[in-house]
Image (cartoon, rainbow, N blue to C red):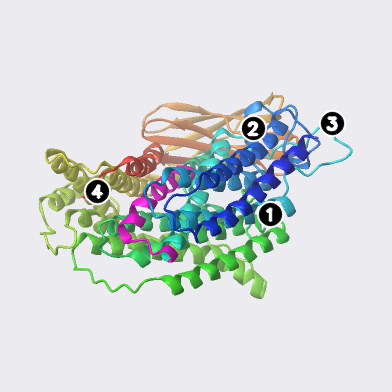
Amino acid sequence: MLSNFGVIFSSIALITSFILIYFSFLELKISDSKIPKKIYNFSLAQLIFSLLSFLILLIGYVFSDFSMINVYENSHTTKPLFYKISGTWGNHEGSLLLWTNILVIFSFLFLILTKNKNKNFKILTLIFQNFLIATFFIFLLTNSNPFSPIFPIPNEGMGLNPILQDPALAVHPPLLYVGFVGSSIYFSAALAALISKVEAKSLATTIKPWVSVSWFFQTLGILVGSIWAYYELGWGGYWFWDPVENSSLMPWFLMTALLHSVLVLERRIGLYSWVIILSILTFTMTVIGTFLVRSGILNSVHTFANDPSRGLFILTFLTLMVFSSVFIFFKYAPSEKKTYRIFSKEFFILINNWFMVFFLAVVLIGTLYPVFLDTLVGEKISVGPPYYNFILAPFLIPLLFLMTSGPRHKWVVSELKKIFNVILFLSIFLFLIIFFIIQENNFLIGLILLFSIYLVVQTIFDFYENFKNKSVNFSRIISHLGFGLLIFFISINHIFSTENNFNIRTGEEKDTKDYIIKFEKLTTMSTTNYKSIVGNFKIINKKKLNTKNLKPEIRFYNQPQTITYEASIRSNFFSDTYLTMSNISDTDVFNIKFEKKPFMNFIWFSVLLISFGGLLNFFSRKKQI
């Protein structure tokens, strides 16, 4: 059976991990500065057999091999090929196999691409990485085997969850896993650096590209997931502080802090221990996110599993990993006493780091507090946007100011520049024009708008000045510009978004402040995958005297039997018109949510700019200025 090959290949990859650990420990006792060829060969063999195991599962999905329980529970013969392929990682077992494969890929790439480095450093990194790989392969084969057989073999599968049958969600997990699992390699490298006493600059130049690439994919994965939730789940916005969304955002805060701290370490200015701590914490937070998503303790539409035994395994692994890391850190961490002059660039980076840690703490508390409250006293609560907006929004103002001012200062040298300069006055002038036009009375929103404009204008001027000097740091400029635009457009979106919820019957119309919404008729539609009821709505804009036709759907899937509510979105350059409908049970009445969402495309584009800046940082070989 095909499933037997999957188990065999995974087992060989696991055995190869132990072989690599064994020979790597032997190499630590040999004074030769070169890593022997057999280490490279075993690492390549591990990569081949790991990829073959994933290929076996992929073939099972493509050809509907229902002899594997995993394929039977998550696929169907009538499902389109694209979703058969994406179904491979659209479940707990398959996604865990993908997770483990990425661990192996990063281990192999680190070994062959990291050249001219301390031999013991590379060997120890390989050892720590293979401990992670072996642990996850053991978890895979003993508790979450994607190749488990089923007998008698069914003729048909149960099908993939319909909300997962979407192009955005098909690519969302692989993108996010490269970010998540990519952090493992600088976790391993950080522990190896402590033991092998790698000097600061060498560590910084080694892990910088790995941090950049994982940060890029993490940012892109969050973006794609956010877009998917916007149009597929009917939530009607760019972010909802859903617990699973939070589990991907929390490591991102630490990656961002680490990405900036490496710039300081690269110049041997300090932060060696802090970079080590951030490297350890980043991967730790990804494992915590994995535990939350796969243990069943979170209630979300896109959790992967609801099996306490799986959660217990991950929790045990997490505990051992944390205690081992803490032990290694306190045993080998060098004493480091470094003071930073106020208004130097590294001072601003350090303050930026603490803001990232603060944001992480706020999100972590908001995510876990309902869980602990439910466990301890049995009381169920939901922590939503009001909590996060109330706490986080005020701290965006000093963060934006630091992002604007920090890059203008020099490394090490204390150079207090004039803060109230021409650029600030220009930003205030632009802000007053915008503020007059929008007539927003919220003081906090006004300040956020002002400082986001300040960041955008200053970044544009930085680009001009650096371009004249032929020393443009495109990575920092594009990322900071993207962040300034993101906060600006989120603020504008918050001010001008409108939402109307109401009940209506076919043939009726609803008169709102700016729109007339006519429910003209219902039609039905059938495909090989589902049947649907389509609502035909005409949206009349009272001010512009134009109309739009929106067609939200209620879909009925057979494999598995599921009902989904599909939003209808008419998007133009500046705004989205958004409508969902759901039927009230046993009546002919439909509940409608109608929204006008300005600048959604600008929000998505801003995040793309941020992630693109990280990608440029990966390719950059010059020191940041």
First in sequence: mark 2 vs mark 3: 2
Nearer the N terminus, badge 2 or badge 1? 2
| Element under disc 2 | helix
The quadrant the N terminus occupies is top right
On the image, numbered disc 3 is attached to which residue? 155
User: Which of the two residues, 108 or 219, is positioned nearer the viewer here?
Assistant: 108
| Residues in magenta, as a range | 195-222
Image coordinates of residue 585 in percent, x first then y, are 72, 44
Report the residue at 56% width, 60% height from top. 288
- Look at the picture and state if 159 lies above or below 201: above
> From the viewer's perspective, is residue 484 above or below residue 515?
below
Point out the tag, 1 or 4, that comes first from the N-terminus. Answer: 1
The residue depicted at 14 percent of the width and 63 percent of the height is 413
| Lower sequence index among marks 2 and 4 | 2
| In this picture, residue 430 sits left or right of residue 214 | left
The residue most toward the right is 152
| Residue 445 appears left or right of 45 | left
Image quadrant assignment for residue 503? top right
Residue 326, numbered label: none
Which mark, residue 138? 1
Q: Quadrant of residue 216?
A: top left
Q: Is residue 515 above or below residue 235?
A: above
Instruction: Report how far apart the C-alphas of labels 2 and 3 lie in the structure.
Output: 19 Å
Q: Is residue 388 magenta?
A: no
Among the two numbered marks 3 and 4 on one chain, the one whose residue lies closer to the N terminus: 3
Image location (x, y in percent) of residue 577: 46, 35
